[in-house]
């Protein structure tokens, strides 16, 4: 069974640029959630996708957007990057959108905005 | 809004010195509580889910317990390889009909010295 994978591992961008992060969900999972984790903090929920539809969103501006594909992989897009966007971006997959389901996390993408 | 607070922020133990980590929560309705372990620069690794007060779960040197207001992660005779950040999280309202958002505490950094 393949776990959650994310790409790239690390990324360096400059302020104002756009970035796309990718996530492949665990085999058999149809739900993907994205989180932002600043240094020394717990992860913060960005949004969740269930069967290609957005299924909940946290307190992030519209320049954070996402997609889920028919194979349940997902992308996180961030436009107009700001210095505060520097963080570890985590993707988690689960078997369904139910709150009782365990979310399994990928290794993360470390984004640095200069 | 749901809140999760973990204490202490950091804990240093000698190998074999047992202790407990605390996770207190304020939620509109408890829908479960999750414990994760996170190594530096990596994604959180799932440890336990607890669903109701009085429930306990064990895995090797770790035991998680749940009351109506808090959860404890007990570490018995820890080893240096138990050093990590331990995160707890609760499912929270994410919009629409979704409670798939995990609200995390800030974590407890555990260091076990040989």
Image (spheres, rainbow, N blue to C red):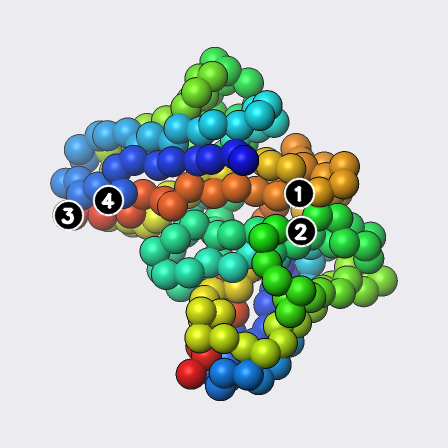
- Camera-nearest residue between B36 and B77: B36
Q: Secondary structure at mark 3?
A: loop
Give yes or no for contact between labels 4 and 1 (Cβ–Cβ under 8 Å). no
Image coordinates for residue A78, horizontal then vertical, percent? 62, 72
The answer as to whether the residues below labels 3 and 1 share one chain is yes
Q: Secondary structure at mark 4?
A: strand
- Mark 3 or mark 4, whichever is nearer to me: 4
Q: Secondary structure at mark 1?
A: loop
Q: Chain of mark 1?
A: B
**Tag 3 residue:** B114
Graded by Cα atoms within 10 Å as few (under 14), some (14 to 19) or many (20 or more), the crowding at tag 1 reads many
Disc 2 from disc 3: Cα separation: 43 Å
Give yes or no for contact between labels 2 and 1 (Cβ–Cβ under 8 Å). yes
Residue A20 is at least partly visible in this image:
yes
The answer as to whether the residues below labels 2 and 1 share one chain is no
Disc 4 from disc 1: Cα separation: 30 Å
The residue depicted at 70 percent of the width and 48 percent of the height is A56
**Tag 2 residue:** A57
The residue depicted at 76 percent of the width and 41 percent of the height is B96
Which label sits on residue B10?
4
Graded by Cα atoms within 10 Å as few (under 14), some (14 to 19) or many (20 or more), the crowding at tag 4 reads some
Which label sits on residue B94?
1
Q: Quadrant of residue B97?
A: top right
Disc 2 from disc 1: Cα separation: 6 Å
Disc 3 from disc 4: Cα separation: 17 Å
- Mark 4 or mark 2, whichever is nearer to me: 2
Graded by Cα atoms within 10 Å as few (under 14), some (14 to 19) or many (20 or more), the crowding at tag 2 reads many
- Camera-nearest residue between B81 and B24: B24
- Mark 4 or mark 1, whichever is nearer to me: 1
């Amino acid at each position: 069974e393949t776990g959650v994978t994310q790409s790239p591992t690390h990324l360096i961008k400059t302020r104002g640029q756009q970035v796309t992060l990718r996530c492949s969900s665990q085999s058999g999972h149809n739900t993907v959630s994205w989180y932002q984790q600043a240094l020394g903090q717990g992860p913060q929920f960005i949004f969740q996708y269930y069967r290609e539809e957005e299924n909940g969103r946290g307190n992030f501006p519209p320049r954070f957007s996402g997609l889920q594909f028919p194979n349940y992989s997902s992308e996180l897009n961030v436009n107009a990057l700001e210095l505060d966007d520097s963080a570890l971006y985590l993707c988690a997959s689960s078997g369904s959108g139910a709150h009782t389901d365990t979310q399994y996390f990928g290794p993360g993408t470390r984004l640095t905005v200069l | 809004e749901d809140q999760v607070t973990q204490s202490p922020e950091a804990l240093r133990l000698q190998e074999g010195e047992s202790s407990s980590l605390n996770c207190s929560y304020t939620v509109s309705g408890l829908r479960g509580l999750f414990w994760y372990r996170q190594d530096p620069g990596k994604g959180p690794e799932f440890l336990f889910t607890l669903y109701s007060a009085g429930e306990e779960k064990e895995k090797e040197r770790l035991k998680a317990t749940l009351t109506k207001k808090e959860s404890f992660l007990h570490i018995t005779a820890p080893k240096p390889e138990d050093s990590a950040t331990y995160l707890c999280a609760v499912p929270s309202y994410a919009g629409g009909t979704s409670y798939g958002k995990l609200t995390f505490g800030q974590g407890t950094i555990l260091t076990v010295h040989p």
